[in-house]
Amino acid sequence: MTRALLILALALWAGALARDRVDLWIDRTDLPPLLLETSAEVRDRNGDLLRVYTVADGRWRLRVSGVATGCDAAHPATTHSDAPRDGDRASRPTAATRAGPCPVHDKPGSGHTGSAIDPLYLRMLFAYEDQRFLTHSGVDLRAMARAAWTSLRAGRITSGGSTLTMQTARLLEASGTGAWRGKLRQIRVALALERQLDKAQILDLYLHLAPMGGNLEGLRAATLSYFGKEPRRLTPAEAALLVALPQSPEARRPDRHPIEARAARDRVLIRMIRQGVLTEAEARVAATDTAPRTRRAFPALAPHLTDRALHAAPDAPTQTLTLDATLQAQLEDLARRTLRGRSDRISVAIVAADHRSGEILASVGSGGMTDRGQGFVDMTQALRSPGSTLKPLIYGLAFDQGLAHPETLIADRPMDFDGYAPQNFDGHFRGEVRVADALRLSLNLPAVQLTEAIGPQNLMAALRRAGTQPDLTGTPGLAVALGGLGMTLTDLTQLYASLANGGMTRPLHWRAQEHLDQPRLMSRASAWQVGHILAGLAPPPGAPANRLAYKTGTSYGHRDAWAIGFDGAHVIGVWMGRPDGTPVPGAFGGDLAAPVLFEAFGRLKPTLDAPPPPPPETLLVGAALLPEPLKRFRSRTGLDDTDRPQVAFPPDGAVLAVGAALPAKVRDGVAPFTWLANGHPVRTAERGREVLLDGLGRGFTELSVIDGAGRSARVEVVLE
């Protein structure tokens, strides 16, 4: 009896020692890296994919999420016959106690910002590959014994008995499956993984690493490539194919071996009937589905802008831009169609934005990244001569400063500005014309006269106040009025967004950002007048007569053709030309770019948004009722600028308590004087230099004074 007890004690001690050694062997396992590199993704404002990038080795490996839902759904299809009993060690949490609802974690699969998974796929995966995944500790002895027995009876290896954890171990180390040393290593790593990670994390690794043929890795890369959709909704036939692929990814690639792929899928469907995952009727219907025979291209919209986003945040797994994928695709298609039949050196760029928020909705840098030789150049960011597209800003500033009114007469005749003698584009002069007509006709001489009165430096300051970055070397001269500087398409579109937004600057952006108060470019009355004039331009032939406010431009030498327009909600800019800056003979903005602009608005929406009504302070009168200094513009050429008028009181930026009237005083200049508040005349033909201005409302007020020579000064005050 004593000898028997001693033998039993020695046996128990040996078993415990062996278990401790196994535990030590597992705990000392050198695990492979568990943090996976996944494809960087750029999404649009609605969460739809714009662009996906491969990982470093050229593989598509996209983030997957939704494991928790899938594990819950798979639970009924599993058994718990192998769950630990009371006599098992309690020093570590067991696989069964860790399984629970299979919670989702933010590691090791680089986050869960991808797409959720259809629970049907997970039920089929567990039923086919690892029925006791939620309960075993990494190795399923029952499955291995069954695999060994069936292989022995068949005289060949029919199945390996590997669990999903063992397969994950093999994928992590890219090890083989046949050699016994490799199998032992998989077992060791699998047991160690089960102690380091929970079931959701292990499944997450598998769903990212499972080979799906070619350079596709993971569930989501396969569903997007083979089915063109996210894995959140899969048919039984699709799910079965995805379960079958990792076992022999190259031999079963549906794009290369469709017959083998379909046969493997059907074998999975038959197994699902036996496992109770599908009914016979469901499997029979699924077997009639056609397996995919091609791979779909991954989304690659807005290639130039998404590359900029990736460069700005290279470590961000997912970025969300303000773009709209549907509109982006439509405008990229428009760009490609526009270039058909043209010289292979001509390119096109388009920027569309919501001028109310400043959000860029589409950005097309060229007709295609690999198309037409220079398609890789992002022409939305290239510095080009803006031609006549700055003229609306010039006229708006002139209205704002009381230098002119849309009904003011201005001379269009040959002039010499200290050696600078600009010509109109067509070489003709029209004598005296209304300012509104001068802008619609894009006459050069009136624009230069107004720029001289405003001051080229003040024009440059206004461009910067609008948030743009004009490129100019040296002191600005009058040539800036006709495009003698460099600007990008995005900046020009931003400038027009400020005009469309009632004169309030609206910086364009392609990332979501907090709305900040921006400086005012001009009064809302002046901005409205500019928009009203531009809306009167005749549309190009074949375009709808929809009163789109737009302006075209052509740079010197026919190097750049522009068209930029806006309605009550959106602004779109179009550029056409050659990226290398060589001339395009006969190219005009009205002929090349304007039709593209109108078609772009047509693709954006069926009808235009109505512009706002004129602000109440807008001076809506005919030429006969204008104040005398506004009836005819007089050029400052030859006048002594040291005598130009200045507002002596109130000072610029003052906050004043106003009663019945506001005292105002002008210094220098020549009488008579005209005083305006927010562009509206309040006192005219004043000979004295001190006046009382009545009828002024509270809030921000812009006061302007115009002298008898047509020169002006202005201040901005707050009246309380």
Image: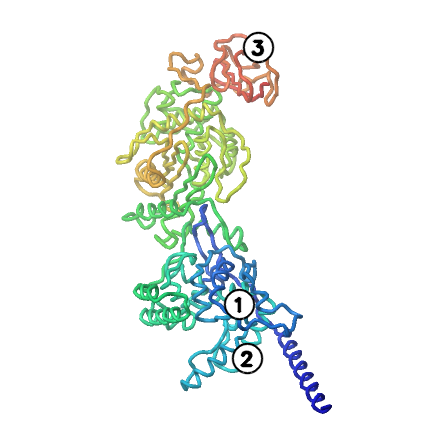
- Counting from the top left corner in percent of width and height, residue 237 is at 36, 64
Horizontal side, residue 466 vs residue 369: left or right: right
Disc number lying in front (3 or 1): 1
Snapshot quadrant of residue 668: top right
- Counting from the top left corner in percent of width and height, residue 16 is at 67, 80
Q: Which residue is mark 1?
A: 134
Q: Earlier in the sequence, mark 1 or mark 2?
A: 1
Compared with residue 57, is residue 632 higher up or lower down, i.e. above or below? above
Snapshot quadrant of residue 290: bottom left
Q: Which residue is mark 2?
A: 184
Residue at the image position 61 percent from the left and 16 percent from the top: 657
- Distance (Cα) linking label 3 and label 2: 96 Å
Residue at the image position 51 percent from the left and 71 percent from the top: 132
- Distance (Cα) linking label 1 and label 2: 22 Å
Q: Which residue is mark 3?
A: 660
What is the three-letter code of the residue carrying label 1?
A: Leu
What is the three-letter code of the residue carrying label 2?
A: Leu
